[in-house]
Amino acid sequence: MNELFQLASLDARETVPESELFPLAELIQDVVQKYQLRAERQKIRLHMPPPGVLPFVRADIGLTERVLENLIENAFEHTPESGIISVLVEPAGGHVSVAVRDSGKGIQSQDLQHIFEPFFQAGSAGGRARQHAGLGLAIARRITELQGGRIFAHSEPGKGATITFTLPMEQPVPNLPEAGV
């Protein structure tokens, strides 16, 4: 029920982001760490490769955390035992891109265009019973768009799915010397 109220609040524009400057990579590392015990229990490898130097973003920390949690929860829902969930962070143009990739069954091409719609549920991994309302990705989309970002999905059936969201950068990434120069 809480998700339904949050989605209604976002749709009615009652939720106003409280933007502040923060290092997105640190927030992501904290959220990934929070899910490590669950990953161990479910025998899933959850990892975040070191992101390198990233700029700060100006966004609502709590809402951004909610987006990331929803994407990781979704990845757990679709990743089988011994699977892998990766969280990748990198600058992309004037944005920072955060991708949550799972090694589940993937999303059928006809479902890709609908996964961010409220109550939509693509097929579940391994025949597991789904115990949610199908609102997590719809909430993630609303929050991301409210903060000036984008969210999109890529999948190949049988090879997992990647859900990516972007947030505008606050400052450009500094130029780093190339290796061997």
Image (cartoon, rainbow, N blue to C red):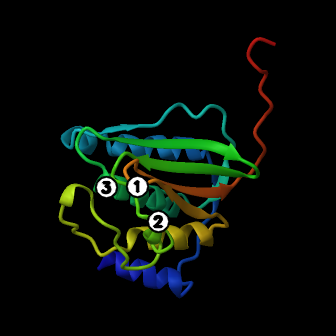
Disc 1 from disc 2: Cα separation: 8 Å
Q: Where in the figure is residue 123, as x and y percent of width and height?
A: 30, 66
Disc sitting over residue 78 in the figure: 3
Identify residue type, mark 1: Pro
Q: Disc 3 residue type?
A: His
Residue 3 higher or lower than 149, as above or below = below
- In the picture shown, does residue 71 fall above or below 174? below
Q: Are marks 1 and 2 in contact (CB under 8 Å)?
A: yes
Q: Nearer the viewer, residue 126 or 137?
A: 126
The answer to which of marks 3 and 1 sits earlier in the sequence is 3
Disc 1 marks which residue?
Answer: 157
Residue 30 horizontal side relative to residue 21, left or right: left
Give the residue at x 66% y 33%: 53
Of the numbered discs 2 and 3, the one sitting upstream in the chain is 3
- Above or below: residue 19 compared with residue 134: above
Crowding at mark 1 (Cα within 10 Å: few <14, some 14-19, many 20+): few
Residue at 47% from the left image edge and 83% from the top image edge: 9
Circle 2 is placed at which residue position?
109
Local packing at callout 2 (Cα closer than 10 Å; few below 14, some 14-19, many 20+) is few
| CA distance separating discs 2 and 3 | 16 Å
SS for dot 3: helix
Q: Residue at x 62, y 60 (%)?
A: 59
Residue found at the very far bottom of the displayed protein? 12
Q: Quadrant of the N terminus?
A: bottom left
Residue in front for this viewpoint, 69 or 85: 85
